[in-house]
Image (cartoon, rainbow, N blue to C red):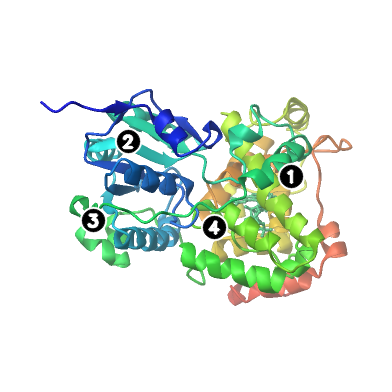
Amino acid sequence: MATIKKISAENLLGELDISSEHYSCLNSKAVNSDKDYILYWLQSSQRVSDNKALTLAGKLANSLKKPLVVGFLFMPDYPGSNFRHFNFMYEGIRESLEELQAAGAGIKVGVGKRNEFFKSISEKAGLILTDQAFLQEPRNWRKKLGEIADTAVIEIASNTVVPVTAASQKEEYAAYTIRKKINSLRDKFLEIWEFPELNHSGKKYTRIPDNFSSRDKFLASLNLPEVTPELKAEKKGGYNAAKEQLMSFSDRKLKRYDQRNDPDLNIQSGLSPYLHFGNISPREIALKVINSTSRQEVKEEFLEELIVRRELSYNFVYYNKNYNKFPDCLPEWAATTLKKHSQDERDYCYSPEEFEQAETHDKYWNAAQLELIYTGNMHNYMRMYWGKKILEWSTGPEPAFTTALYLNNRYALDGRDPNSYAGIAWCFGKHDRAWQERPIYGKVRYMNRRGLERKFKMQDYLERINKLTPEKNIAGD
Ligand SMILES: Cc1cc2nc3c(=O)[nH]c(=O)nc-3n(C[C@H](O)[C@H](O)[C@H](O)COP(=O)(O)OP(=O)(O)OC[C@H]3O[C@@H](n4cnc5c(N)ncnc54)[C@H](O)[C@@H]3O)c2cc1C
């Protein structure tokens, strides 16, 4: 009988000079170097470029003289997902798997049943790496993989610039409490992780469904929930599309990023769906911006959003298990004040269906909802207004929270993200301070349509949205 060589995952990573800030072990099992391959379970970092977990898996495969196998599972039951999300996601997965296959990795694509998939991919794996998860269900899946696998399972902090646990050990109150912590570590973690050349072929382990190469046939076979109406312009995910978006933002819009709040200018990067699916790393985006020729002030404004604000959201969902529950996700003062004002009389009150159909009295709100429906996105400033008004025009704060989360996650291509939960919760007082007390909102920050009209050319915004759906005549009187 062959002797089974068992090594600790920490020792292996130590040999590659990887400090514990980058990873955590999902079980206490040893690496089994007598097994057939090293496995990377690709889930939230859907890219090859600057993918820490994948890079480390490749390097460890080489040092253990094993092939690398990459597994991906399509999960039609992924919480809150629908055809819109999978249609965007497919391209990034196909592109990454083709690149990895060409590099010599074995590829295993599964559909459905998680535990069966985990069992089948882990049987022959001597070590398993995956990307770190933040939301509850993906964290549970990783825990399960750690239990099912007969070998070490490690998750790598790949989707933020500063690993969440390195930035802070607790839930942070607001941007001002986490900013210094993140910015003091920012440069240390701003490096690109290059995928290595693989020394051993994993080809013989490849298993891909026959219909995978045909996007339409494959997606149809998943029986995904449909969302109507369809997007006006189909958007495809993937690293190549993300890179193109980044280049065009950096060349054309970044220099005016200080005007990003203006909804009619549409000066934002449009990178959030790609970030959500992990099609591009925030480190790669940050370095592109830092090395651009734009003014330092606009660069820092962008990095504040991309790193501080985004990573505050990751801190929130990582440390607060109630991130999707009203009022438990809120600070005490916000929960108390909203409860006190929950029965206040409303001038307008809409059902979730009326909100969904964009049938309010407010043309700006309706335009924002139509933007979400027809583009899968909504301008950041309008997102704030949209969420605040759902709070104001619902029967109470709790149904308002449910409606906002439902609409955001159903229609937005970047929905179901840590930023989704933090963004919605912000409309109800999260990561904010108390303001002067008023009806319905209590001490939660208020926004009104006069503010929109005073600051921006709202008619231009209406006209932009009207082009998506002229039959609604959203830009008329
Ligand atoms: C009610 C509400 C719901 C939201 N839902 C989502 C969501 O589902 N998914 C999502 O990614 N973002 C969400 N946000 C945050 C923000 O609106 C979007 O990240 C941003 O508009 C995305 O567009 P962009 O990529 O062009 O942003 P840019 O301005 O180009 O910013 C670049 C990146 O920085 C990050 N960022 C920008 N603004 C914020 C912010 N306020 N908070 C945290 N990170 C930020 C994003 O990752 C973004 O892609 C929500 C905000 C609110 C108020």
Residue identifier under label 3: 208
Q: Looking at the image, tell me whether mark 4 or mark 3 is earlier in sequence order.
A: 3
Amino acid residing under circle 1? Glu
Dot 4 lies on which element?
Answer: helix
Residue 230 to residue 402: above or below: below
Dot 3 lies on which element?
Answer: loop
Image quarter (top left, top right, bottom left or bottom right) of the C terminus: bottom right
Q: Are marks 3 and 2 in contact (CB under 8 Å)?
A: no
Q: Residue at x 58, y 58 (%)?
A: 357
Q: Residue at x 53, y 34 (%)?
A: 19
- Rendered image: mark on residue 392: 1
Cα distance between the residues tagged 1 and 3: 50 Å
**Taking 473 as reference, is 131 left or right?**
left
Disc 4 under 8 Å from ligand 1? The reply is: yes
Crowd band around label 4 with a 10 angstrom C-alpha radius: few (<14), some (14–19), many (20+)? many
Q: Residue at x 24, y 35 (%)?
A: 119
Amino acid residing under circle 3? Ile
